[in-house]
Image (cartoon, coloured by chain):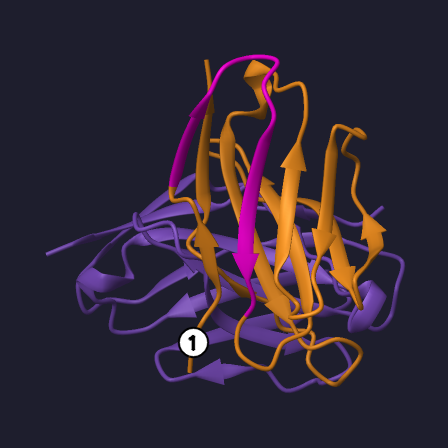
Amino acid sequence: AQTVTQSQPEMSVQEAETVTLSCTYDTSESDYYLFWYKQPPSRQMILVIRQEAYKQQNATENRFSVNFQKAAKSFSLKISDSQLGDAAMYFCAYSLGTGANSKLTFGKGITLSVRP
Amino acid sequence: DAGVTQSPTHLIKTRGQQVTLRCSPKSGHDTVSWYQQALGQGPQFIFQYYEEEERQRGNFPDRFSGHQFPNYSSELNVNALLLGDSALYLCASSLGDYDTDTQYFGPGTRLTVL
């Protein structure tokens, strides 16, 4: 079974600084998808970024980028120029792909606070 | 473009009762997945509906059942409620067997079992 591990329960960053959130996963598959979701206090789970395992290039979305290390099964999220609105719980998630393989397996999450 | 909607927002029930939660997928989506998120934890997959059938199921007892309607909306039913069923229930929609693997989430229903 696939597992996702987020070992840091909490992190804090100064506004405008950069922070990296860690995630490791375990799978025997070669093709899969990885995601970072953000869940603010409003509870709405928002997709931040996705990575397809067959792509070597790391995904980026504006201030958000990932460091995907397939051999190490590591998938970290870097947030640049942190903003107060980035404060939320962040979840790393894994899926095998589309259709019947699309169920998400989540880590326990990490609470990110942003200091003004 | 309407996103994923869920109702009700909050719900309080007592042990042994039954509850029904509802979800309308994002416009154009035909697949609905349900997740249970206990306080301070990541969401756990309950089941997924596609073409009005349960396509896959997580490790949840038969007390958890669902349904998908022809308009792709979905219901989650939980029978014989236990205290441990208290959680945030999230619905996510996606587009069937096509390219996208990305699931879009609703705001959730907070269920409290007393």
- Residue A19 position (above or below residue B110): below
Q: Is residue A47 magenta?
A: no
Range shown magenta: B10-25
> Label 1 lies in what chain?
B
Query: Relative to B93, is B9 on the left or the right?
Result: left
Q: Main secondary structure of the magenta part?
A: strand
Q: Nearer the viewer, residue B92 or A54?
A: B92
* Quadrant in the picture for residue B77: top right
The residue located at (74%, 55%) in the rendering is: B48
Q: Residue at x 43, y 68 (%)?
A: A78
| Chain B tint as drawn | orange
Whether residue B22 is visible here, answered yes or no, is yes
Q: Residue at x 72, y 85 (%)?
A: A55
Q: Position of residue A104 (x, y in %)?
A: 68, 57
Taking the spot 58% from the left edge, 44% from the top edge, the residue there is B43
User: At label 1, which amino acid type do we have?
Assistant: Ala
Graded by Cα atoms within 10 Å as few (under 14), some (14 to 19) or many (20 or more), the crowding at tag 1 reads few
Residue A65, horizontal then vertical, whole percent: 46, 76
Q: Residue furthest front?
A: B70
Q: Is residue A64 above or below residue B41?
A: below
Quarter of the rendering occupied by the C terminus of chain A: bottom left
Chain A colour is purple
Q: Position of residue A109 (x, y in %)?
A: 50, 45
Residue B15 included in the magenta stretch of the image: yes
- Residue A99, placed above or below residue B20: below
Question: Helix, strand, or loop for circle 1?
Answer: loop
Residue A106 seen by the camera: no
Place of residue B47 in the rendered image (x, y in percent of width and height, measured from the top left)? 74, 49
Count of numbered labels shown in the rendering: 1
Q: Which residue is mark 1?
A: B2
